[in-house]
Amino acid sequence: MSEQGQERKERYRRVRSEFDDLETEDKVLFLMEAAVSTIARGVDEFGRAVSDELNKAFSRRAERRRRHDEGSGKTAAGSSENDTSSSTEGTMGSTGSTSGPSGSAPNGSDGGEFDNIP
C-alpha cells in the first residue's frame, strides 16, 4: 500500500475511534449533519449538471436557428415586425397563456427538440 493509502487508513481509524467515544446523542447529531450535508452537495452537483446540459441544448438550438435564418436570407437588421424568433410575443406571461401571434405556433415554436415540453 502507498504512503498516502497508509495515511488515509490511519486517519480513518483515528476518526472512527473518536466517533465511537461520542455519546449516543452526539453520534446521532453527527450522522444527521453528515447525511444532510451529503444530500445538499448531491443536489447542488445535480443542479449544476442539469444547468450545464440545458445551456448546451439551448446553445445548439440557437445555433440551428441561426444557421436556418442565414440559409433563408434572414438577418438581424432585415427581420420583419412579425418575426417571432426575437420577439417577446408568444412567451408565457403572468396569466400562463402560451398563445403566440396569430399564424404562429405557441412561443414562436419552430419544431425544435423542446417544442413538445409542456
Image: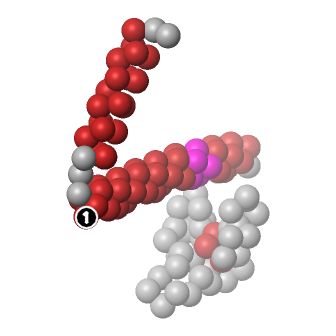
Residue farthest bottom in this picture: 95
Q: Position of residue 85 (x, y in %)?
A: 59, 62
Image quadrant assignment for residue 23: bottom left
Residue 57 within the segment the image draws in magenta? yes
Q: Inspect this view and state whether residue 77 appears.
A: no
Q: Position of residue 59 (x, y in %)?
A: 58, 46
Q: In the image, what residue type sits under mark 1? A: Glu
Residue 19 within the segment the image draws in magenta? no
Q: Position of residue 37 (x, y in %)?
A: 35, 54
Residue at image point 40% right, 15% down: 6
Residue at image point 52% right, 67% down: 87
In depth, the one of 112 and 88 nearer the eye is 112
Color scheme of the displayed model: secondary structure
Q: Position of residue 90 (x, y in %)?
A: 57, 77
Mark 1, residue position: 25
Image quadrant assignment for residue 70: top right
Q: Which residues are magenta?
A: 53-59
Image quadrant assignment for residue 8: top left
Q: Is residue 57 above or below residue 100?
A: above
Left or right: 113 as drawn, with respect to 26: right
Q: Is residue 90 above or below residue 83?
A: below
Secondary element at tag 1: helix
Q: Inspect this view and state whether residue 24 appears.
A: yes
